[in-house]
C-alpha cells in the first residue's frame, strides 16, 4: 500500500508576458517522500515553488495540500496548511537574534515578550531533533551562510511545517555545509 498523497500540483501554468515559465505541470508528493526538481536555470523550478507557496498566482491549475485546495497567492494559507519554504535568498533580519527571527510573525508584536521561555525551549528541541545546531541568542548577521540556512529551516519547522520546500538549498553552501544539510 502506498503512502497517502500530501501535496498535489495539478495543471499549473504560469506565464510572464510571452514567456511560459510553467506549462501544465502536475506532480504529487506522498507522505515520507523526498522529491527533487532538476533543470537548468530559467526552467521554472523556482516559479513553481513560488506558486505552491502562494508568492505567485498560477494562470491555471491548483495546489492541494493534505486534501485542501490552497487559495492562490496566499502564503499564510500555505503556512497554515503545513508548508514551509526556505528560499535561496534568505529572509532574515541580520540585526536580530536567531530566536527573534524564528518567532517573528508567529504572534502579535505586543506579545513578543510573552512566552519567550517556551519559544526558546521549542527552538532548542527542534534544533536538537533535526540536527540543526545554532545558538538561539546569536545575532543572525554574525552567522555563516550555512547557519543562516539552518535558521530558515528552523523558522519553517517552528511554524509546524509538514512539507518543507528548499529552493536551491546547496547553491550558497560550501561542500561541507551541503554534506551536513543532506
Image (tube, grey):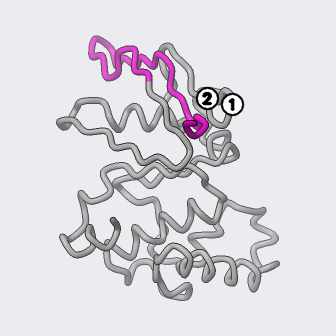
Q: CA distance from mark 2 to mark 1?
A: 6 Å
The residue located at (43%, 37%) in the rendering is: 49
Viewer-nearest residue: 130 or 75: 130
Judged from this view, the residue extending furthest toward the front is 1
x, y percentage for residue 99? 60, 78
The range drawn in magenta is 1-26
Tell me which secondary structure the magenta stretch mostly adopts. strand
Q: Which residue is mark 2?
A: 64
Q: Magenta includes 94?
A: no
Q: Assign the C terminus to one quadrant of the image.
A: bottom left
Quadrant occupied by the N terminus: top right
Mark 1: which secondary structure? Answer: loop
In the rendering, at what x and y percent does residue 32 appear? 52, 50
Can residue 18 be found in the magenta stretch? yes
Horizontal and vertical percent position of residue 80: 70, 46
Q: Which residue lies at the image location 66% right of the left edge and 58% below the top edge?
A: 160
Q: Are marks 2 and 1 in contact (CB under 8 Å)?
A: yes
Q: Which mark is residue 67?
A: 1
Task: Using the image, determine if residue 39 lies above or below residue 135.
Answer: above
Q: Nearer the viewer, residue 55 or 79?
A: 79
Q: Residue at x 80, y 79 (%)?
A: 115
- Local packing at callout 1 (Cα closer than 10 Å; few below 14, some 14-19, many 20+) is few
Give the left or right position of residue 124, taking residue 170 as reference. right
Location of residue 143 by image quarter: bottom left
Seen in the picture, residue 132 relative to 3 is either above or below; the reply is below
- The residue that appears at 61% across and 37% down in the rendered structure is 4
Task: Examine the rendered structure and indicate whether residue 143 appears above or below residue 155.
Answer: below
Amino acid at each position: 500500500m502506498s503512502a497517502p498523497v500530501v501535496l498535489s500540483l495539478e495543471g499549473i501554468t504560469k506565464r510572464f508576458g510571452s514567456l511560459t515559465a510553467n506549462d501544465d505541470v502536475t506532480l504529487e508528493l506522498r507522505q515520507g517522500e523526498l522529491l527533487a526538481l532538476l533543470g537548468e536555470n530559467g526552467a521554472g523550478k523556482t516559479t513553481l515553488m513560488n506558486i505552491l507557496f502562494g508568492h505567485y498566482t498560477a494562470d491555471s491549475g491548483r495546489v492541494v495540500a493534505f486534501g485542501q485546495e490552497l487559495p492562490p497567492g496566499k502564503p499564510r494559507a500555505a503556512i497554515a496548511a503545513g508548508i514551509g519554504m526556505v528560499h535561496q535568498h534568505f529572509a532574515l533580519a541580520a540585526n536580530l537574534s536567531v530566536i527573534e527571527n524564528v518567532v517573528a510573525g508567529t504572534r502579535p508584536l505586543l506579545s513578543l515578550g510573552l512566552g519567550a521561555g517556551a519559544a526558546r525551549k521549542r527552538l532548542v528541541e527542534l534544533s536538537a531533533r533535526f540536527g540543526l545546531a545554532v545558538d538561539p541568542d546569536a545575532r543572525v548577521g554574525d552567522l555563516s551562510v550555512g547557519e543562516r540556512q539552518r535558521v530558515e529551516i528552523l523558522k519553517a519547522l517552528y511554524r509546524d511545517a509538514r512539507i518543507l520546500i528548499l529552493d536551491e538549498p546547496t547553491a550558497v553552501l560550501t561542500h561541507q555545509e551541503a554534506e551536513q544539510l543532506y
